[in-house]
Amino acid sequence: MSINLLKGFEFRKKETPVHSLDPRTKLAVTIMYTIMSLAFSRPMPLVFFMLTLLPYMIVGKITRRWLASMKGLWLILSFILVLNTLLTSLDFAISMSLRVLLLVSAFTVFFMTVHPDDLALALLAMKVPFSFTFTLTLATRFMPTLAREAQSIMDAQRSRGLELESGGIIKRVKNMVPIIIPLIIQSIKRAFSVAEALESKAFGASKHRTNYFEISMRKRDWFVLLFTLLFVISFIVLYHLPLLPPVFYFRIPY
Amino acid sequence: MIEFRSVSYKYPDGPLALENVSMIIEQGCILALVGKNGAGKTTLVKCLNGLIKPTSGQVIVNGKNTRDASVAELSKTVGLVFQNPDNQLFSPTVRDELAFSLKNRGTREEDLEPLIDETLKEFNLVHLKNRSPFLLSGGERKRVAMASLACMKQPVLVMDEPTQGQDGTQKRNLENMFRRLQENGRTLIIVSHDVDFVARLANRVIVMEKGHVLVDGSVEDAFQSRQHLDVEHLVPTQELELKWFHGMKHGNVQGLIRMPRTEFFKEIRQRIR
Ligand SMILES: Nc1ncnc2c1ncn2[C@@H]1O[C@H](COP(=O)(O)OP(=O)(O)OP(=O)(O)O)[C@@H](O)[C@H]1O
Ligand SMILES: [Mg+2]
Protein backbone atom coordinates (compact mmCIF):
# COMPACT_ATOMS: atom_id res chain seq x y z
CA MET A 1 0.00 0.00 0.00
CA SER A 2 2.60 2.57 1.02
CA ILE A 3 4.78 1.20 -1.76
CA ASN A 4 2.56 2.93 -4.31
CA LEU A 5 3.19 6.18 -2.53
CA LEU A 6 6.95 5.81 -2.75
CA LYS A 7 6.69 5.13 -6.46
CA GLY A 8 5.18 8.60 -6.77
CA PHE A 9 8.63 10.03 -6.26
CA GLU A 10 10.17 8.22 -9.18
CA PHE A 11 11.37 10.32 -12.08
CA ARG A 12 10.78 9.05 -15.62
CA LYS A 13 12.32 10.74 -18.60
CA LYS A 14 9.73 12.22 -20.94
CA GLU A 15 9.68 14.97 -23.55
CA THR A 16 6.97 17.34 -22.39
CA PRO A 17 6.85 21.11 -21.87
CA VAL A 18 6.61 20.48 -18.13
CA HIS A 19 9.68 18.25 -18.06
CA SER A 20 11.73 20.79 -19.99
CA LEU A 21 11.01 23.65 -17.60
CA ASP A 22 13.90 24.79 -15.46
CA PRO A 23 13.98 22.85 -12.16
CA ARG A 24 14.00 26.15 -10.25
CA THR A 25 10.70 27.11 -11.84
CA LYS A 26 9.14 23.84 -10.80
CA LEU A 27 10.61 24.15 -7.33
CA ALA A 28 9.11 27.64 -6.97
CA VAL A 29 5.71 26.45 -8.19
CA THR A 30 5.80 23.54 -5.75
CA ILE A 31 6.69 25.86 -2.90
CA MET A 32 3.83 28.17 -3.87
CA TYR A 33 1.43 25.25 -3.81
CA THR A 34 2.80 24.19 -0.45
CA ILE A 35 2.14 27.67 0.91
CA MET A 36 -1.36 27.68 -0.54
CA SER A 37 -2.18 24.30 0.95
CA LEU A 38 -1.09 25.57 4.35
CA ALA A 39 -2.68 29.01 3.98
CA PHE A 40 -6.21 27.72 3.42
CA SER A 41 -8.16 25.48 5.73
CA ARG A 42 -11.50 25.49 3.94
CA PRO A 43 -12.44 22.75 1.48
CA MET A 44 -13.26 24.79 -1.62
CA PRO A 45 -10.02 26.73 -2.11
CA LEU A 46 -8.11 23.50 -1.62
CA VAL A 47 -10.28 21.69 -4.17
CA PHE A 48 -9.74 24.61 -6.52
CA PHE A 49 -5.97 24.44 -6.20
CA MET A 50 -6.09 20.67 -6.64
CA LEU A 51 -7.94 21.27 -9.92
CA THR A 52 -5.35 23.79 -11.09
CA LEU A 53 -2.71 21.09 -10.73
CA LEU A 54 -4.54 18.95 -13.28
CA PRO A 55 -3.53 20.83 -16.46
CA TYR A 56 0.05 20.71 -15.23
CA MET A 57 -0.19 16.93 -14.82
CA ILE A 58 -1.95 16.41 -18.16
CA VAL A 59 0.67 18.41 -20.06
CA GLY A 60 3.40 16.56 -18.15
CA LYS A 61 1.74 13.20 -19.00
CA ILE A 62 1.87 11.94 -15.43
CA THR A 63 -1.83 11.89 -14.54
CA ARG A 64 -2.06 8.14 -14.54
CA ARG A 65 1.05 7.61 -12.43
CA TRP A 66 -0.11 10.33 -10.07
CA LEU A 67 -3.43 8.50 -9.61
CA ALA A 68 -1.61 5.23 -8.98
CA SER A 69 0.64 6.77 -6.36
CA MET A 70 -2.32 8.43 -4.64
CA LYS A 71 -3.70 4.95 -3.99
CA GLY A 72 -0.91 4.61 -1.45
CA LEU A 73 -2.38 7.55 0.45
CA TRP A 74 -5.80 6.19 1.29
CA LEU A 75 -4.79 4.75 4.64
CA ILE A 76 -3.35 8.05 5.90
CA LEU A 77 -6.28 9.99 4.43
CA SER A 78 -8.94 7.81 6.01
CA PHE A 79 -7.07 8.07 9.31
CA ILE A 80 -7.08 11.89 9.13
CA LEU A 81 -10.69 11.91 8.04
CA VAL A 82 -12.01 9.67 10.80
CA LEU A 83 -9.95 11.18 13.60
CA ASN A 84 -10.75 14.78 12.72
CA THR A 85 -14.44 14.12 12.20
CA LEU A 86 -14.60 12.56 15.65
CA LEU A 87 -12.56 15.26 17.36
CA THR A 88 -13.60 18.40 15.47
CA SER A 89 -15.92 18.69 12.49
CA LEU A 90 -16.48 17.09 9.10
CA ASP A 91 -15.62 20.39 7.42
CA PHE A 92 -12.25 20.48 9.12
CA ALA A 93 -11.63 16.78 8.52
CA ILE A 94 -12.25 17.12 4.79
CA SER A 95 -10.12 20.24 4.61
CA MET A 96 -7.22 18.52 6.32
CA SER A 97 -7.46 15.50 4.01
CA LEU A 98 -7.50 17.83 1.02
CA ARG A 99 -4.52 19.68 2.43
CA VAL A 100 -2.51 16.46 2.67
CA LEU A 101 -3.66 15.43 -0.79
CA LEU A 102 -2.62 18.76 -2.27
CA LEU A 103 0.71 18.79 -0.48
CA VAL A 104 1.62 15.27 -1.49
CA SER A 105 0.38 15.83 -5.06
CA ALA A 106 2.43 18.99 -5.45
CA PHE A 107 5.56 17.15 -4.38
CA THR A 108 4.70 14.07 -6.42
CA VAL A 109 4.36 16.23 -9.52
CA PHE A 110 7.67 17.87 -8.73
CA PHE A 111 9.58 14.63 -8.23
CA MET A 112 7.94 12.95 -11.20
CA THR A 113 9.06 15.71 -13.57
CA VAL A 114 12.42 16.78 -12.14
CA HIS A 115 15.44 14.57 -12.55
CA PRO A 116 17.31 14.28 -9.23
CA ASP A 117 20.43 15.66 -10.90
CA ASP A 118 18.54 18.73 -12.10
CA LEU A 119 17.24 19.28 -8.60
CA ALA A 120 20.81 19.25 -7.36
CA LEU A 121 21.86 21.72 -10.06
CA ALA A 122 18.97 23.99 -9.13
CA LEU A 123 19.94 23.98 -5.47
CA LEU A 124 23.59 24.54 -6.30
CA ALA A 125 22.60 27.52 -8.44
CA MET A 126 20.82 28.81 -5.36
CA LYS A 127 24.08 28.57 -3.40
CA VAL A 128 23.10 25.55 -1.31
CA PRO A 129 26.26 23.66 -0.20
CA PHE A 130 27.11 20.69 -2.36
CA SER A 131 27.22 18.09 0.41
CA PHE A 132 23.64 19.03 1.27
CA THR A 133 22.30 18.93 -2.29
CA PHE A 134 24.08 15.67 -2.86
CA THR A 135 22.48 14.07 0.18
CA LEU A 136 19.11 15.18 -1.07
CA THR A 137 19.72 13.80 -4.56
CA LEU A 138 20.85 10.51 -3.12
CA ALA A 139 17.76 10.30 -0.92
CA THR A 140 15.39 10.89 -3.84
CA ARG A 141 17.40 8.56 -6.01
CA PHE A 142 16.95 5.73 -3.49
CA MET A 143 13.21 6.16 -2.89
CA PRO A 144 12.13 3.85 -5.75
CA THR A 145 14.89 1.41 -4.84
CA LEU A 146 13.47 1.26 -1.36
CA ALA A 147 9.99 0.63 -2.73
CA ARG A 148 11.24 -2.20 -4.91
CA GLU A 149 13.18 -3.67 -2.04
CA ALA A 150 10.14 -3.59 0.25
CA GLN A 151 8.27 -5.49 -2.45
CA SER A 152 10.93 -8.21 -2.70
CA ILE A 153 11.06 -8.57 1.06
CA MET A 154 7.30 -8.97 1.23
CA ASP A 155 7.49 -11.60 -1.52
CA ALA A 156 10.25 -13.48 0.28
CA GLN A 157 8.39 -13.55 3.59
CA ARG A 158 5.10 -14.53 1.99
CA SER A 159 6.92 -17.49 0.44
CA ARG A 160 7.70 -18.57 3.98
CA GLY A 161 4.03 -18.66 4.82
CA LEU A 162 3.72 -15.18 6.36
CA GLU A 163 0.15 -13.97 5.89
CA LEU A 164 0.06 -10.24 5.40
CA GLU A 165 -3.58 -9.79 4.53
CA SER A 166 -5.25 -11.54 7.44
CA GLY A 167 -5.75 -11.11 11.18
CA GLY A 168 -6.60 -8.26 13.48
CA ILE A 169 -4.76 -4.98 13.94
CA ILE A 170 -2.25 -6.38 16.43
CA LYS A 171 -1.43 -9.38 14.25
CA ARG A 172 -0.98 -7.12 11.24
CA VAL A 173 1.36 -4.80 13.07
CA LYS A 174 3.30 -7.81 14.33
CA ASN A 175 3.47 -9.11 10.76
CA MET A 176 5.28 -5.95 9.72
CA VAL A 177 8.34 -6.90 11.82
CA PRO A 178 9.71 -9.45 9.31
CA ILE A 179 9.29 -6.80 6.60
CA ILE A 180 10.65 -3.73 8.38
CA ILE A 181 13.76 -5.28 9.89
CA PRO A 182 15.31 -6.55 6.63
CA LEU A 183 14.38 -3.22 5.04
CA ILE A 184 16.19 -1.22 7.71
CA ILE A 185 19.19 -3.53 7.71
CA GLN A 186 19.54 -3.36 3.96
CA SER A 187 19.24 0.42 4.04
CA ILE A 188 21.98 0.71 6.64
CA LYS A 189 24.17 -1.69 4.70
CA ARG A 190 23.62 0.31 1.55
CA ALA A 191 24.35 3.57 3.32
CA PHE A 192 27.73 2.21 4.34
CA SER A 193 28.56 0.84 0.93
CA VAL A 194 27.48 4.06 -0.79
CA ALA A 195 29.69 6.01 1.62
CA GLU A 196 32.63 3.73 0.87
CA ALA A 197 32.01 3.99 -2.85
CA LEU A 198 31.90 7.78 -2.58
CA GLU A 199 35.14 7.95 -0.71
CA SER A 200 36.82 5.69 -3.21
CA LYS A 201 35.63 8.08 -5.91
CA ALA A 202 37.34 10.97 -4.09
CA PHE A 203 34.16 12.64 -2.91
CA GLY A 204 34.98 16.00 -1.33
CA ALA A 205 38.61 15.90 -2.37
CA SER A 206 38.42 19.16 -4.29
CA LYS A 207 36.69 22.36 -3.28
CA HIS A 208 35.80 23.30 -6.85
CA ARG A 209 33.48 20.88 -8.55
CA THR A 210 32.65 21.28 -12.20
CA ASN A 211 29.30 20.41 -13.72
CA TYR A 212 28.81 18.82 -17.08
CA PHE A 213 25.31 20.22 -17.56
CA GLU A 214 24.27 23.80 -16.94
CA ILE A 215 20.70 24.90 -16.30
CA SER A 216 19.25 28.17 -17.52
CA MET A 217 16.01 30.06 -17.03
CA ARG A 218 14.30 30.67 -20.34
CA LYS A 219 11.43 32.95 -21.36
CA ARG A 220 8.78 30.36 -20.69
CA ASP A 221 10.20 29.70 -17.24
CA TRP A 222 9.75 33.34 -16.34
CA PHE A 223 6.30 33.22 -17.86
CA VAL A 224 5.18 30.20 -15.82
CA LEU A 225 6.74 31.67 -12.70
CA LEU A 226 5.12 35.08 -13.03
CA PHE A 227 1.80 33.62 -14.06
CA THR A 228 1.64 31.29 -11.04
CA LEU A 229 2.80 34.02 -8.70
CA LEU A 230 0.20 36.50 -9.98
CA PHE A 231 -2.48 33.85 -9.84
CA VAL A 232 -1.65 32.87 -6.27
CA ILE A 233 -1.38 36.44 -4.99
CA SER A 234 -4.59 37.57 -6.65
CA PHE A 235 -6.38 34.53 -5.28
CA ILE A 236 -5.28 35.31 -1.73
CA VAL A 237 -6.20 38.98 -2.06
CA LEU A 238 -9.58 38.30 -3.64
CA TYR A 239 -10.35 35.58 -1.12
CA HIS A 240 -9.74 37.83 1.84
CA LEU A 241 -11.47 40.95 0.48
CA PRO A 242 -13.85 38.86 0.02
CA LEU A 243 -14.63 39.20 -3.66
CA LEU A 244 -14.72 35.58 -4.87
CA PRO A 245 -18.02 33.85 -5.81
CA PRO A 246 -19.86 32.44 -2.75
CA VAL A 247 -19.02 28.84 -3.64
CA PHE A 248 -15.43 29.44 -2.46
CA TYR A 249 -16.69 30.21 1.03
CA PHE A 250 -18.87 27.12 1.25
CA ARG A 251 -18.79 25.29 4.56
CA ILE A 252 -19.90 21.75 5.26
CA PRO A 253 -22.57 22.13 7.92
CA TYR A 254 -21.48 19.50 10.40
CA MET B 1 2.84 -32.27 -9.73
CA ILE B 2 3.04 -28.87 -11.37
CA GLU B 3 1.73 -27.86 -14.73
CA PHE B 4 2.22 -24.69 -16.77
CA ARG B 5 -0.43 -24.16 -19.43
CA SER B 6 0.69 -21.58 -22.01
CA VAL B 7 1.73 -19.16 -19.32
CA SER B 8 2.63 -15.59 -20.28
CA TYR B 9 3.51 -12.79 -17.94
CA LYS B 10 4.17 -9.13 -18.52
CA TYR B 11 5.41 -6.88 -15.71
CA PRO B 12 3.04 -3.92 -15.28
CA ASP B 13 5.68 -1.45 -16.40
CA GLY B 14 8.19 -3.83 -17.90
CA PRO B 15 8.85 -6.36 -20.60
CA LEU B 16 7.08 -9.59 -21.48
CA ALA B 17 9.03 -11.78 -19.07
CA LEU B 18 7.33 -15.10 -19.86
CA GLU B 19 5.95 -16.03 -23.22
CA ASN B 20 3.71 -19.01 -23.76
CA VAL B 21 5.49 -21.40 -21.40
CA SER B 22 4.02 -24.89 -21.17
CA MET B 23 5.48 -27.77 -19.19
CA ILE B 24 4.79 -30.48 -16.68
CA ILE B 25 7.06 -30.97 -13.69
CA GLU B 26 6.83 -34.47 -12.26
CA GLN B 27 7.17 -35.23 -8.60
CA GLY B 28 10.56 -36.29 -7.32
CA CYS B 29 12.78 -34.86 -10.03
CA ILE B 30 15.59 -32.36 -9.85
CA LEU B 31 14.87 -29.72 -12.45
CA ALA B 32 17.47 -27.13 -13.34
CA LEU B 33 16.49 -23.80 -14.86
CA VAL B 34 19.31 -22.13 -16.72
CA GLY B 35 19.64 -19.20 -19.09
CA LYS B 36 21.31 -15.83 -19.26
CA ASN B 37 20.52 -12.84 -17.06
CA GLY B 38 17.02 -11.52 -17.61
CA ALA B 39 15.83 -14.70 -19.35
CA GLY B 40 12.82 -14.97 -17.03
CA LYS B 41 13.94 -17.68 -14.61
CA THR B 42 13.06 -15.80 -11.44
CA THR B 43 9.75 -14.73 -12.93
CA LEU B 44 8.89 -18.32 -13.78
CA VAL B 45 9.80 -19.50 -10.32
CA LYS B 46 7.63 -16.84 -8.70
CA CYS B 47 4.64 -18.26 -10.58
CA LEU B 48 5.03 -21.52 -8.67
CA ASN B 49 3.76 -20.20 -5.35
CA GLY B 50 1.43 -17.58 -6.71
CA LEU B 51 3.57 -14.50 -6.04
CA ILE B 52 3.08 -13.84 -9.73
CA LYS B 53 -0.25 -14.67 -11.30
CA PRO B 54 0.14 -15.20 -15.05
CA THR B 55 -1.22 -12.49 -17.35
CA SER B 56 -2.58 -15.32 -19.46
CA GLY B 57 -2.57 -19.10 -19.12
CA GLN B 58 -2.60 -21.11 -15.91
CA VAL B 59 -0.23 -22.60 -13.40
CA ILE B 60 -1.63 -25.70 -11.72
CA VAL B 61 -0.01 -26.87 -8.48
CA ASN B 62 -1.31 -30.16 -7.09
CA GLY B 63 -4.46 -29.81 -9.13
CA LYS B 64 -5.07 -26.30 -7.87
CA ASN B 65 -4.95 -23.16 -10.01
CA THR B 66 -2.56 -20.67 -8.40
CA ARG B 67 -5.09 -17.96 -9.16
CA ASP B 68 -7.54 -19.50 -6.68
CA ALA B 69 -5.12 -19.97 -3.78
CA SER B 70 -3.27 -17.59 -1.47
CA VAL B 71 0.51 -17.48 -1.38
CA ALA B 72 0.48 -18.65 2.23
CA GLU B 73 -1.59 -21.68 1.21
CA LEU B 74 0.63 -22.51 -1.77
CA SER B 75 3.76 -22.04 0.31
CA LYS B 76 2.82 -25.23 2.15
CA THR B 77 3.38 -27.11 -1.10
CA VAL B 78 6.06 -24.99 -2.76
CA GLY B 79 8.94 -23.49 -0.80
CA LEU B 80 10.69 -20.69 -2.66
CA VAL B 81 14.13 -19.47 -1.61
CA PHE B 82 14.99 -16.10 -3.07
CA GLN B 83 18.19 -15.09 -4.78
CA ASN B 84 19.08 -12.53 -2.11
CA PRO B 85 19.08 -13.95 1.44
CA ASP B 86 19.00 -10.45 2.94
CA ASN B 87 15.41 -10.15 1.75
CA GLN B 88 14.19 -12.53 4.38
CA LEU B 89 16.51 -12.73 7.35
CA PHE B 90 15.26 -10.75 10.34
CA SER B 91 15.45 -12.89 13.48
CA PRO B 92 17.95 -12.40 16.30
CA THR B 93 19.38 -15.91 15.88
CA VAL B 94 19.66 -18.54 13.18
CA ARG B 95 17.49 -20.84 15.28
CA ASP B 96 14.70 -18.24 15.50
CA GLU B 97 14.87 -17.72 11.77
CA LEU B 98 13.94 -21.38 11.23
CA ALA B 99 11.41 -21.31 14.06
CA PHE B 100 9.59 -18.41 12.39
CA SER B 101 8.98 -20.44 9.21
CA LEU B 102 7.89 -23.48 11.17
CA LYS B 103 5.45 -21.47 13.26
CA ASN B 104 3.98 -19.93 10.11
CA ARG B 105 3.31 -23.45 9.04
CA GLY B 106 1.60 -24.23 12.33
CA THR B 107 4.22 -26.65 13.66
CA ARG B 108 3.62 -27.65 17.29
CA GLU B 109 6.07 -26.35 19.92
CA GLU B 110 7.36 -29.79 20.84
CA ASP B 111 8.19 -30.64 17.21
CA LEU B 112 10.09 -27.40 16.72
CA GLU B 113 13.55 -28.22 18.11
CA PRO B 114 14.03 -31.63 16.45
CA LEU B 115 13.07 -30.18 13.06
CA ILE B 116 15.38 -27.20 13.53
CA ASP B 117 18.33 -29.33 14.61
CA GLU B 118 17.83 -31.76 11.77
CA THR B 119 17.76 -29.00 9.17
CA LEU B 120 20.73 -27.14 10.64
CA LYS B 121 22.75 -30.33 10.48
CA GLU B 122 21.87 -30.88 6.82
CA PHE B 123 22.95 -27.38 5.91
CA ASN B 124 26.17 -27.46 7.98
CA LEU B 125 24.88 -24.70 10.22
CA VAL B 126 24.86 -26.36 13.65
CA HIS B 127 27.81 -24.30 14.89
CA LEU B 128 26.00 -21.11 13.97
CA LYS B 129 22.71 -21.97 15.65
CA ASN B 130 22.75 -19.14 18.18
CA ARG B 131 24.53 -16.54 16.09
CA SER B 132 22.84 -13.53 14.55
CA PRO B 133 22.14 -14.09 10.85
CA PHE B 134 23.28 -10.53 10.10
CA LEU B 135 26.79 -11.14 11.33
CA LEU B 136 27.36 -14.22 9.15
CA SER B 137 29.27 -14.36 5.89
CA GLY B 138 27.43 -14.09 2.57
CA GLY B 139 27.59 -17.81 1.87
CA GLU B 140 26.45 -18.67 5.39
CA ARG B 141 23.51 -16.26 5.16
CA LYS B 142 22.51 -17.90 1.91
CA ARG B 143 22.49 -21.30 3.61
CA VAL B 144 20.45 -19.96 6.52
CA ALA B 145 17.90 -18.63 4.04
CA MET B 146 17.73 -22.03 2.33
CA ALA B 147 17.47 -23.85 5.65
CA SER B 148 14.69 -21.55 6.82
CA LEU B 149 12.59 -22.77 3.93
CA ALA B 150 13.73 -26.36 3.66
CA CYS B 151 12.80 -26.98 7.31
CA MET B 152 9.13 -26.62 6.38
CA LYS B 153 9.37 -29.88 4.42
CA GLN B 154 7.33 -28.75 1.47
CA PRO B 155 7.00 -31.41 -1.26
CA VAL B 156 8.50 -28.93 -3.74
CA LEU B 157 11.56 -26.84 -2.95
CA VAL B 158 12.60 -24.08 -5.34
CA MET B 159 15.96 -22.39 -5.02
CA ASP B 160 17.16 -19.34 -6.88
CA GLU B 161 20.94 -19.63 -7.22
CA PRO B 162 21.67 -22.02 -4.32
CA THR B 163 25.39 -22.22 -5.08
CA GLN B 164 25.90 -18.46 -5.18
CA GLY B 165 28.71 -17.58 -2.80
CA GLN B 166 29.30 -21.17 -1.67
CA ASP B 167 32.82 -22.52 -1.46
CA GLY B 168 33.78 -25.89 -2.93
CA THR B 169 33.08 -27.90 0.22
CA GLN B 170 29.69 -26.35 0.77
CA LYS B 171 28.79 -26.86 -2.87
CA ARG B 172 29.57 -30.55 -2.61
CA ASN B 173 27.58 -30.71 0.61
CA LEU B 174 24.61 -29.01 -1.04
CA GLU B 175 24.83 -31.41 -3.95
CA ASN B 176 24.71 -34.42 -1.65
CA MET B 177 21.93 -32.93 0.40
CA PHE B 178 19.80 -32.16 -2.63
CA ARG B 179 20.20 -35.79 -3.69
CA ARG B 180 19.06 -36.92 -0.25
CA LEU B 181 16.05 -34.63 -0.45
CA GLN B 182 15.21 -36.13 -3.81
CA GLU B 183 15.56 -39.65 -2.44
CA ASN B 184 12.99 -38.67 0.18
CA GLY B 185 10.60 -37.94 -2.65
CA ARG B 186 10.85 -34.15 -2.72
CA THR B 187 10.87 -32.24 -5.98
CA LEU B 188 13.70 -29.75 -6.42
CA ILE B 189 13.73 -26.87 -8.84
CA ILE B 190 17.06 -25.11 -9.05
CA VAL B 191 17.87 -21.90 -10.86
CA SER B 192 21.58 -21.82 -11.50
CA HIS B 193 24.38 -20.43 -13.61
CA ASP B 194 26.69 -23.14 -12.33
CA VAL B 195 27.03 -25.50 -15.29
CA ASP B 196 29.00 -28.20 -13.44
CA PHE B 197 26.64 -28.22 -10.51
CA VAL B 198 23.65 -28.59 -12.81
CA ALA B 199 25.36 -31.23 -14.95
CA ARG B 200 26.08 -33.45 -11.97
CA LEU B 201 22.78 -33.04 -10.21
CA ALA B 202 19.85 -32.42 -12.52
CA ASN B 203 17.51 -34.99 -14.06
CA ARG B 204 16.13 -32.41 -16.38
CA VAL B 205 17.37 -29.09 -17.72
CA ILE B 206 15.23 -26.28 -19.01
CA VAL B 207 17.07 -23.54 -20.85
CA MET B 208 15.19 -20.27 -20.95
CA GLU B 209 15.72 -17.40 -23.31
CA LYS B 210 13.79 -14.14 -23.58
CA GLY B 211 10.86 -15.55 -21.65
CA HIS B 212 10.39 -18.82 -23.46
CA VAL B 213 11.68 -22.35 -23.18
CA LEU B 214 14.57 -22.87 -25.56
CA VAL B 215 15.57 -26.41 -24.60
CA ASP B 216 13.82 -28.90 -22.38
CA GLY B 217 15.53 -32.24 -21.90
CA SER B 218 18.08 -34.28 -20.04
CA VAL B 219 21.48 -32.95 -18.99
CA GLU B 220 22.96 -34.97 -21.84
CA ASP B 221 20.66 -33.25 -24.34
CA ALA B 222 21.28 -29.77 -23.06
CA PHE B 223 25.02 -29.96 -22.51
CA GLN B 224 26.03 -32.37 -25.28
CA SER B 225 28.25 -30.05 -27.30
CA ARG B 226 29.78 -26.63 -27.61
CA GLN B 227 27.23 -25.70 -30.29
CA HIS B 228 24.43 -26.45 -27.87
CA LEU B 229 25.92 -24.32 -25.14
CA ASP B 230 26.56 -21.47 -27.57
CA VAL B 231 22.91 -21.45 -28.56
CA GLU B 232 21.96 -21.58 -24.90
CA HIS B 233 24.30 -18.68 -24.06
CA LEU B 234 26.12 -20.75 -21.49
CA VAL B 235 29.85 -20.90 -21.04
CA PRO B 236 31.27 -24.40 -20.73
CA THR B 237 33.62 -25.09 -17.85
CA GLN B 238 37.00 -26.71 -18.35
CA GLU B 239 35.63 -29.88 -16.83
CA LEU B 240 32.84 -30.01 -19.38
CA GLU B 241 35.23 -29.29 -22.24
CA LEU B 242 37.48 -32.12 -21.11
CA LYS B 243 34.51 -34.44 -20.96
CA TRP B 244 33.47 -33.50 -24.49
CA PHE B 245 37.01 -33.98 -25.71
CA HIS B 246 37.40 -37.42 -24.19
CA GLY B 247 33.86 -38.39 -24.95
CA MET B 248 34.31 -37.60 -28.64
CA LYS B 249 37.53 -39.56 -28.77
CA HIS B 250 35.91 -42.63 -27.29
CA GLY B 251 32.38 -42.12 -28.58
CA ASN B 252 30.95 -41.70 -25.09
CA VAL B 253 29.99 -38.06 -24.51
CA GLN B 254 26.64 -39.02 -23.02
CA GLY B 255 28.20 -41.28 -20.43
CA LEU B 256 30.74 -38.72 -19.28
CA ILE B 257 28.74 -35.52 -18.85
CA ARG B 258 27.15 -36.56 -15.61
CA MET B 259 30.12 -38.33 -14.15
CA PRO B 260 31.37 -36.89 -10.83
CA ARG B 261 34.65 -35.03 -11.17
CA THR B 262 36.83 -37.41 -9.11
CA GLU B 263 35.59 -40.45 -10.97
CA PHE B 264 36.11 -38.74 -14.31
CA PHE B 265 39.69 -37.81 -13.50
CA LYS B 266 40.41 -41.33 -12.31
CA GLU B 267 39.19 -42.61 -15.64
CA ILE B 268 41.33 -40.14 -17.57
CA ARG B 269 44.37 -41.15 -15.59
CA GLN B 270 43.74 -44.79 -16.47
CA ARG B 271 43.27 -43.96 -20.16
CA ILE B 272 46.49 -41.98 -20.28
CA ARG B 273 48.39 -44.93 -18.89
N1 LIG C 1 9.77 -6.13 -10.87
C1 LIG C 1 10.00 -6.02 -12.18
N2 LIG C 1 9.43 -5.03 -12.91
C2 LIG C 1 9.65 -4.92 -14.23
N3 LIG C 1 10.41 -5.75 -14.94
C3 LIG C 1 11.01 -6.77 -14.29
C4 LIG C 1 10.84 -6.96 -12.88
N4 LIG C 1 11.56 -8.05 -12.50
C5 LIG C 1 12.15 -8.51 -13.62
N5 LIG C 1 11.83 -7.75 -14.70
C6 LIG C 1 12.26 -7.98 -16.09
O1 LIG C 1 11.77 -9.23 -16.53
C7 LIG C 1 12.75 -9.94 -17.28
C8 LIG C 1 13.00 -11.30 -16.65
O2 LIG C 1 13.59 -11.10 -15.37
P1 LIG C 1 13.97 -12.28 -14.38
O3 LIG C 1 14.27 -11.65 -13.06
O4 LIG C 1 12.92 -13.31 -14.42
O5 LIG C 1 15.32 -12.82 -15.03
P2 LIG C 1 16.30 -13.99 -14.53
O6 LIG C 1 16.31 -15.03 -15.59
O7 LIG C 1 15.95 -14.41 -13.16
O8 LIG C 1 17.73 -13.26 -14.53
P3 LIG C 1 19.01 -13.44 -13.54
O9 LIG C 1 19.82 -14.56 -14.08
O10 LIG C 1 19.74 -12.15 -13.72
O11 LIG C 1 18.51 -13.63 -12.16
C9 LIG C 1 13.96 -9.05 -17.34
O12 LIG C 1 13.96 -8.41 -18.59
C10 LIG C 1 13.77 -8.06 -16.21
O13 LIG C 1 14.31 -6.81 -16.57
MG1 LIG D 1 16.88 -14.23 -11.27
Image (cartoon, coloured by chain):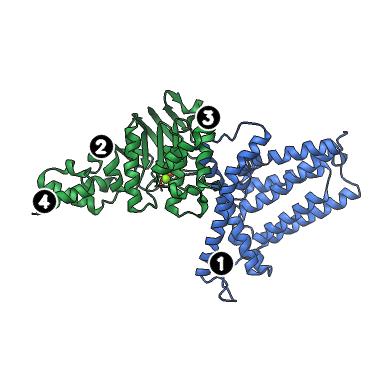
User: Which residue is located at x 48 percent, y 47 percent?
Assistant: B129
Q: CA distance from mark 1 to mark 2?
A: 55 Å
Distance from the alpha carbon under mark 2 to that under mark 4: 28 Å
Give the class, few, some or many, for how many residues have Cα within 10 Å of label 3's Cα (few <14, many ≥20): some
Which residue, given by chain and number where applicable, does mark 3 sit on? Answer: B70
> What residue lies at 66% left-to-right and 68% top-to-bottom?
A125
Provide the residue designation for mark 2. B218
Q: Of callouts 3 and 2, which one flags the residue occurring earlier in the amino acid sequence? A: 3
User: Residue A203 placed where, x, y %?
Assistant: 55, 70
Mark 2, ligand 1, within 8 Å: the answer is no
- As measured in the structure, the alpha-carbon distance from the residue carrying label 1 to the one carrying label 3 is 50 Å
Badge 4 is on which residue?
B270
Q: Nearer the viewer, mark 1 or mark 3?
A: 3
Is disc 1 surrounded by few (<14), some (14 to 19) or many (20+) residues within 10 Å?
A: few
Question: Disc 2 marks which amino acid?
Answer: Ser
Quarter of the image where the C terminus of chain A is located: top right
Mark 2 or mark 4, earlier in chain = 2
The residue carrying mark 1 is A213
The answer to whether residue A126 is above or below residue B110 is: below
Q: Chain of mark 3?
A: B
Spot occupied by residue B5 in the image (x, y as percentages of width and height): 39, 28
